[in-house]
């Protein structure tokens, strides 16, 4: 808690971002976008973003909002352009963002490897674009299908067992002093953003075009490939996690279900095992 409180004088703009995200996924998109515009002005004044970044984001959001009026080849081209724009933001390739370093080569425990974390302003903007392009992701609530939800939930402990068996993680019980800033960032800036993109947007688009099974598998594999920088094993683990979250979203139609599954998995990883991996 002391570590978190010491960061408050510099991390307070991210609370506006989190409020904007929460408003948008709760169906109050206008409020979310207004809060996002406020954040843009504050971030610009504080030097957290440059005017070029504001311009690129603004064009991307306008383009995403216009996708619903397109059809045929134009719609396909528009969605491909949106995906590339999202990848550029998530990969920190858009110039003009100055993300805040809050954890620098820290350790979750004596058996864990170095861990570095930034509070990002670029990657979370993906959420607003995909919501504008595919608003049905938060409007498709349906009666829960118990079987796929149970299968999805059971995949999470299975994934930990697989990690222990292969040596990808080792038991290490305890929370580091920086767990609160990790939780805040992981829940909103990482899990909510990634689940909106991979499950709410990509999986929904794939299912509408190819059917349920192919849609969930395709989105899960792409989620795995997005973690290719961590090596082949991480691609496999992430694909399984993606399938679990994909089943959770398919079973309920509620975006918060895969978000909480994803975050719960990450939180248990931090609390019970070496994070992000063993030394």
Image (cartoon, rainbow, N blue to C red):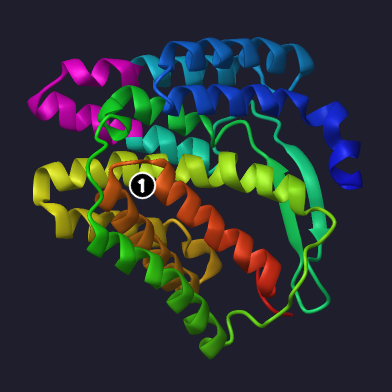
Image position of 88 (left or right of 112): left
Residue 224 drawn above or below residue 166 = above
Callout 1: SS: helix
Callout 1 crowding tier (Cα within 10 Å): few <14, some 14–19, many ≥20: many
Residue underneath mark 1: 198
Q: Quadrant of residue 244?
A: bottom left
Q: Which residues are magenta?
A: 63-82
Q: Residue at x 69, y 79 (%)?
A: 278
Residue 269 drawn above or below residue 33 = below
Q: Residue at x 37, y 37 (%)?
A: 84
Q: Residue at x 76, y 19 (%)?
A: 47
Image position of 244 (left or right of 120): left
Where the C terminus falls, by quadrant?
bottom right
Residue 43 point in image, percent of width and height: 70, 18
Would you say residue 253 sits in the magenta stretch? no
* Camera-side residue of 261 and 113: 261
Residue 252 point in image, percent of width and height: 29, 47
* Camera-side residue of 189 and 40: 189
Residue 115 drawn above or below residue 23 = below
Q: Residue at x 32, y 59 (%)?
A: 220
């Amino acid at each position: 808690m002391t570590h978190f409180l010491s960061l408050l004088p510099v991390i307070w703009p991210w609370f506006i971002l989190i409020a904007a995200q929460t408003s948008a996924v709760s169906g109050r998109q206008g409020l979310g976008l207004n809060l996002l515009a406020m954040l843009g002005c504050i971030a610009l004044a504080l030097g957290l973003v440059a005017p070029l970044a504001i311009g690129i984001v603004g064009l991307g959001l306008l383009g995403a909002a216009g996708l619903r009026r397109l059809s045929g080849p134009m719609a396909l081209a528009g969605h491909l352009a949106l995906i590339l724009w999202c990848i550029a933001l998530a990969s920190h390739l858009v110039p003009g963002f100055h993300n805040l370093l809050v954890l620098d080569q820290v350790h979750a425990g004596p058996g864990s490897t170095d861990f570095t974390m930034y509070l990002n302003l670029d990657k979370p903007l993906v959420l607003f674009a995909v919501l504008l392009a595919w608003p049905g992701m938060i409007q498709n609530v349906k009666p829960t299908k118990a079987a796929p939800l149970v299968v999805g939930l059971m995949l999470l402990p299975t994934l930990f067992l697989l990690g222990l068996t292969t040596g990808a993680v080792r038991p290490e019980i305890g929370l580091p002093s920086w767990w609160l800033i990790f939780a805040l960032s992981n829940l909103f800036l990482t899990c909510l953003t990634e689940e909106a993109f991979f499950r709410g947007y990509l999986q929904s688009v794939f299912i509408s075009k190819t059917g349920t099974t192919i849609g969930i598998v395709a989105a899960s594999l792409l989620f795995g490939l997005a973690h290719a920088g961590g090596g082949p094993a991480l691609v496999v683990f992430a694909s399984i996690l993606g399938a679990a979250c994909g089943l959770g979203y398919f079973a309920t139609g509620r975006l918060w279900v895969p978000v909480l599954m994803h975050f719960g998995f990450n939180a248990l990883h931090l609390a019970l095992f070496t994070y992000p991996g063993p030394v």
